Image (cartoon, rainbow, N blue to C red):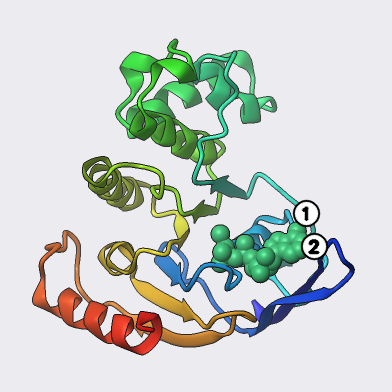
Amino acid sequence: MRSLSMTYTDRDGRAVHALDGIDLRFPEGGVTAIIGASGCGKSTLLRILAGLETAYQGDVEVAGAPVQGPGLARGIVFQDHRLIPWMSVDENIGLALHRLTADERQARVAATLSLVGLSAFSSAYPAQLSGGMAQRVAIARALAHRPRMLLLDEPFGALDALTRMQLQDELLAIRARERVTTVLVTHDIEEALYLGDRVVVLSSRPGRVAETIDVDLPHPRARNDPRLAALRLALYDNYFHS
Ligand SMILES: Nc1ncnc2c1ncn2[C@@H]1O[C@H](COP(=O)(O)OP(=O)(O)O)[C@@H](O)[C@H]1O
Ligand SMILES: [Mg+2]
């Protein structure tokens, strides 16, 4: 992203300056975590990257090509799973694979489900899944067409603490196997530091890059690693303490 800015017009016709002058690179195969206060433009940034928001100023490129709309090169997961309730798990995942033959599609769905450990639930319906399982299916759906980028917008925000930790570890396992370039938006500092190779802090609105922190700790990381604790305290004091 180069000089990325975004201004919305709200219902009363007033300009809402959401993002301002964002310059960011997302290293291939790495996890970039983006944190910032509510309303600072995190979702806007991710939606722009996904091609869901095109009325921005500046340049946004993925693998050298400008982002001009949604595409299969980027899979996105939101806080809610957004699965289609009357379709089974494998039908939900297969939905985006219409370009494959039926055999290829079936094989891809099976492989992706096994990646998130849900092979036994291929014919279940979303209402039969726990919140954590439904989010795993949403991640599988995003990965099924082998995107270059996985975009996650507070994907674990609605889960209980234990399930959230499980899914964080699962995401690391997936990432180790797939090496997909990942952008994780979160308001959870600990999550950002535990998962991110790099943590980008956005200022409050309009969102600007306030700081970029490289987290040079190999995985698996200990959640109680004192170096993570020190980074968390510094971030908290600098940006989230009011
Ligand atoms: N479609 C929209 N129309 C007008 N304002 C919007 C729209 N979407 C987001 N905003 C505003 O832009 C700012 C950034 O929103 P968002 O990207 O959702 O922030 P975050 O995800 O960090 O909470 C907020 O002030 C929000 O109210
Ligand atoms: Mg948001």
Residue at mark 2: C-beta within 8 A of ligand 1: no
Q: Given contact means CB atoms under 8 Å apart, are the residues at marks 1 and 2 in contact? A: yes
Residue that label 1 marks: 69
Q: CA distance from mark 1 to mark 2?
A: 7 Å
Q: Residue at x 35, y 89 (%)?
A: 238
**In this picture, is 82 found above or below 151?**
above
Residue 114 coordinates in the image, percent (x, y): 34, 27
Q: Residue furthest top?
A: 123
**For the residue marked with disc 2, what is the amino acid?**
Thr
In the picture, measured across the screen, residue 2 lies left or right of residue 238, that is: right
Specify the quadrant that holds the N terminus.
bottom right
Specify the quadrant that holds the C terminus.
bottom left
Q: Residue at x 68, y 25 (%)?
A: 98
Residue at mark 1: C-beta within 8 A of ligand 1: no
In the picture, measured across the screen, residue 201 lies left or right of residue 205, that is: left
Res 234 visible: yes
Q: Secondary structure at mark 1?
A: loop
Res. 55 image quadrant: bottom right
Residue that label 2 marks: 54
